[in-house]
Every structure is written in C-alpha cells, then in structure tokens.
Amino acid sequence: MSGIGPEAAPDYTIEQKWAAYTEEEHAVWRLLFERQERLLAGRACREYLDGLGALGVAANGIPDFRRLSEILDRTTRWRIVAVPGLVPDAVFFDLLARRRFPSTCFIRRRDQLDYLQEPDIFHDIFGHVPLLMDPVFADYMQAYGQGGLKARGLGHLERLARLYWYTVEFGLISTSDGLRIYGSGILSSGSESVYCLGDPHPHRLVFDLRRVMRTCYRIDRFQDTYFVIDSFDQLFEATRPDFAPIYREVAALPDFEPDQVVENDQRFSGKACSRKKWAAAELGPSLGRKRLEDVR
Ligand code: HBI
Ligand code: FE
C-alpha cells in the first residue's frame, strides 16, 4: 500500500483540503467533465445522469466533498470520505458497510487524461458517486461492503471482487431506450464509454452471478466481456442470497478467461446502442486505450 501518509487516521481517512486545489487541477476536471458530459448523453443510464444533476457535480471545478456529502446524506444516507489512494480491502469494505464512500483526492495530470492504473478523484467522484443517489444502488453498495468482509473471512475475496468489477466498475444495463452504462470505470473513461456500447469486439452477456464470479478480468485495457443487468432491483436480488454455498460451488468449477464465451452463455440480444453516430470505422480496428482517445 503506497502513499499512506502520517496524517491518515486509523481508518485511512484524510482531509480533502479543497481550498488547496490549483487552477490547473480544476482545469483538468473541467476538461474531463465536459468531454464525458458530451459522450454520456444517450450512453449513461438515467439513474446515473439524474444523480449527477441532483448532486450538482459540474464543469466548474473539483467538487468539495463536504457539499456532496450533505446532499448524499439527505438522500440515501451515504457520505464521502477522503482517502490517500487504494486502501486495504478490509478498510474499503468496512467503509462501504458503514455507507462511507472512500474517494481519492488527487486528479490525474493533463497528459494522463484517459488512462490511470489507480483511481483518482475524477473516477471516484464523477464515476461512482452519482449512482449512490439511487436508493437501490445505494443499498447494493452497502451490501457489497458487508459481503466483502464475509468473503474475506471465507477466503473467496477474488470471486467477490469479480462481481464488483463486472457490476460497479464495468456494468451495463438494459433499458427501454437501449443498452446503457452504469459502471464507473466506463463512465469516467472517454474511450471506453464509446467502445463498450458500439464496438463489435467485446462480448455482452446477460448477467449471471455464478458466471461473473468465474470470470477473470484485466485491469490494463478495455474489457473483452461486459455483463448486462435488467435493473438495479435485479442486481440487488441476485446478490441477496448467502454467498457461502455459491462460493464453494463456483470454486469447484474452472474459471473463464476474460474473452472466453461458451455454449451455455446467454448473449445480450437487445439493441446495443441507439446512437446512430456510432460506426466501427470511426475508431479504427482494435485500438488500445490511448489511441482510441486520440481519435475522439
Ligand atoms: N480502495 N480507494 C479504494 N478504491 C477502491 O476501489 C478499492 C480500494 N481498495 C480495495 C479495492 N478497491 C478492491 O480490492 C475491491 O474492489 C475488491
Ligand atoms: Fe472504481
């Protein structure tokens, strides 16, 4: 664990020190915000866009956690706490279980606009926090924290981490208007928010808890497979049962590679993207993150 300074409390929380952000840092936020706002109309799910609006997360600069926490607390009883970077799993889950969302404070540099290995404040706040305004998703995140502490005790953390990855970070949702994004890893990425809906390469499979728990993931490039839920209610219900017997069942079966699809898999067959604008040619053949961004 890097970057944990002496100022961190035992639960790893620090102060955001909002007044200390520089004009350049606010300018990077504005750049990222304006780009995503344009891309996410017609691509992000309604619940996310509503949350973003209600929180007043906007282009004018890096938001103050105190202001966001007040609105969140009133709406779904969540709060944001500042952390110095990735925190240990147990700390992370414990915060979620107490309806505290850990957000980093630093913002990426202008030359790293589209790709970072570690979360920054744009990913954490712009990507994650708006959905915490949705009552069902808010409960799902808390349940995830509680489940994380339990999974850790049972030695099945990896399987639960896959669930987080393929839902909270990279999930897609089917709506009457077509496929939409709710995963924060996508919402905070310019190029992946276009790729995940419109590119012919990735598989889009109907969400299945056991299938997700068996699927490895890559953190260093676009996803090969996305899982599609019907609603946050469905997600919450699917993850309500006791996972202990499911972990045992799944542990006895082989894992899936990120790009692997087998006969039993159910592909999502709905309309993938309602934006006519999309054309594979627009982005060229199988580009990496960096190059995709260059052409947007
Ligand atoms: N810490 N700040 C932060 N943000 C995360 O998303 C995070 C973390 N620590 C652990 C962790 N995620 C993961 O291991 C879990 O998603 C499984
Ligand atoms: Fe994240």
Image (spheres, rainbow, N blue to C red):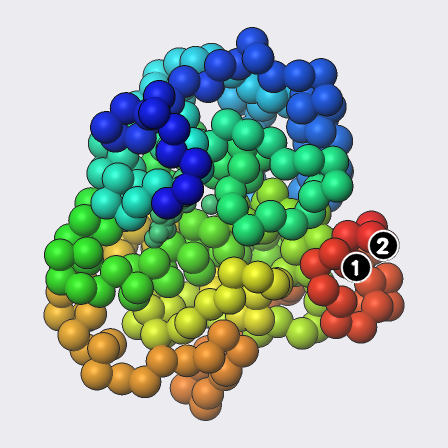
Q: Decide if residue 192 is on the left or right side of residue 236.
A: right
Q: Decide if residue 106 is on the left or right side of residue 108.
A: left
The answer to whether 17 is drawn above or below residue 32 in the figure is above
The answer to whether 210 is drawn above or below residue 117 in the figure is below
**Residue at the spot of label 1:** 291
Closer to us: 276 or 258: 258
Closer to us: 3 or 181: 3
**Residue at the spot of label 2:** 295
Closer to us: 169 or 75: 169
Mark 1, secondary structure of its residue = helix
Image coordinates of residue 21 in percent, x first then y, are 61, 17
Residue 115 shows up from this direction: yes
In the displayed image of the protein, which residue is found farthest to the front?
6
Q: Residues within 10 Å of mark 1 (few under 14, many from 20)?
A: some
Q: Residue at x 15, y 53 (%)?
A: 150
Image coordinates of residue 236 in percent, x first then y, are 30, 51
Specify the label residue 169 is tagged with.
none
